Structure formats: C-alpha cells, structure tokens
Image: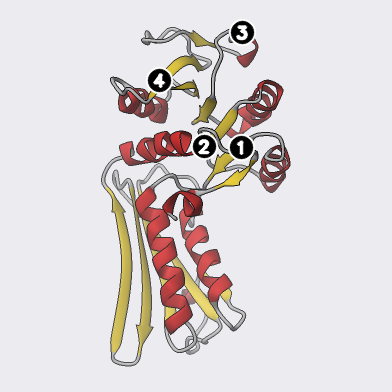
Amino acid sequence: MLRVILNGCNGHMGRFVTSGIAGREDIEIIAGVDLNTEVPNTYPVYDSFDKITEKADAVIDFSHPSALSGVLDYCTGNSVALVECSTGLSSEQVDRIKADSSVIPVFYSGNMSIGVNLIIELSKSAARVLGDSFDIEIIEAHHNQKLDSPSGTAYMIADAIRDELSRPVEYEYDRHSRSLKRPKDEIGIHSVRGGTIVGEHQVMFAGNDEIITISHSARSKALFSTGAINAALFLYGKEPGMYSMKDMLK
C-alpha cells in the first residue's frame, strides 16, 4: 500500500484526488496539507508540513507555486518521492526540482493527463514524417477564467514538435498584425477562451491537398487527478531522478 500526503487537499484538484483514491487497495492518503483545515476529511489535515508525524512514501502536490520550497524541503529531508502537479512554476523553481531529483524520485509534467501526453508523442511522430513539408498549427481552448495564454500544454506540444524538426521555427501568435504569406519557419499557436471548457488541444498538419489533425478533449478535471495517482504508483520504488509521462507511457 502506497502511503501518500496530499498537498492542497482541500482545493478543487485535491478533492478530485481524494475521491479518486477513496476505496483503493493499492494507495491511501495518510495526511493532507492545506491552509484551510476546517474541511472534514477521512485523514488528518495540517496547515504546514512541519506538523506532519505520519510516515509517507510520496507527496502529491496540487497546490500553488509559492508552496514548492516547503514541499521540496520536506521531501528531500524525509526521503519522500514527489509528484509535482502545480502549474505556473518559474524556471528557477523547475531548476530546483531538477536539482533535488538527485536526492529523491520526482515526477513532473506540465499536464497530468495521460491522453494529452499521448498526443504529444503522436505529434512528435507526425512531425518527423511530415514536418518539413506541412504547415503546423496548434489550437487550444480553455474556460474563461484561465489566466495564461497560450496554455502551458500548448507550449509543451510546440516544444516537442520543434525538437523533431530539421529546420528552425518560431512561434507565431498574432498574424492579424501583418499582411504577408505564411512563412514555412513558424508554428502557429492560437488560444480560445470561453465558458467552462476544461481543456482542448488540436494539432493540425496542413499540406498540399490533405490535413492531418491530432486532438484531445478533456471533459472533466478528474482525469488530471487520475494521472497524478498513476504517477505516484509509478514512482513507488524508483531511484532518485526526474520522471515524466513519457517514462510512464513506455
């Protein structure tokens, strides 16, 4: 039985993780950490990692970038694996995660959906075959409360494709500001915001007389919690190092 501490347990995603683990026989939440300790749970909830007395195998972090330092201090100090799910981390924070992965196993991905990471792999394969002769466009759609644009996942897809191409490319976000033909050395990235869209990503390879499209549509945020739970189980018994969805999909 994998014993997990859930950081951000009373937040939106934390509640999905709690629900997803409830009743399972291979993983259990032994404690939670959240600034809001008033919400009743089936496990004890602390407002600080310093107060935890339970012995854990892993931490699942669905909190806020500001909490990362404390999470890493706890995990490295107690030899606990980390599944890092917080979004909006700075490059400096990502660098620290990579540095601390020399001490503990860390699972880190910009998107915890297995499906999204699968379309990234499919897009890389398509880019290797089609990239030099096809125009590439990425369209992403999210709810009207999302702050960042384009999404971090759109950048993940674009970066993965760019690494497979034999030619240098730039990302283009704003064609309306210029009047000229589309150059070959770019990947278009477009954002849609509206309603309660959970997350949709489409990769279009447009060639002469044919279009190939790879897409993923998230219908509930529960799928991200499922990815985090699977990641925690995947890390169990692993050596220190950086792991991602690519490793889990092998």
| Vertical comparison of 135 with 85: above or below | below
Asked if labels 3 and 2 touch by Cβ distance under 8 angstroms, the answer is no
Asked if labels 1 and 2 touch by Cβ distance under 8 angstroms, the answer is yes
Where residue 1 appears, as percent x and y from the top left, is 42, 22
Where residue 42 appears, as percent x and y from the top left, is 36, 10
Q: Nearer the viewer, mark 3 or mark 4?
A: 4
Q: Secondary structure at mark 4?
A: strand
Q: Which residue is mark 1?
A: 105
| Amino acid type at image mark 2 | Leu
Neighbor class of circle 2 (other Cα within 10 Å; few <14, some 14-19, many 20+) is many
Q: Which residue is mark 3?
A: 51
Q: Nearer the viewer, mark 2 or mark 3?
A: 2
| Amino acid type at image mark 1 | Pro
Q: Which residue is mark 2?
A: 235
Q: Which residue is mark 4?
A: 28
Residue shown at 60% from the left, 13% from the top = 48
Give me the C-alpha separation between circle 3 and circle 4: 19 Å
| Amino acid type at image mark 4 | Glu
Where residue 208 appears, as percent x and y from the top left, is 34, 92
Give me the C-alpha separation between circle 2 and circle 1: 7 Å
Of callouts 3 and 4, the N-terminal one: 4
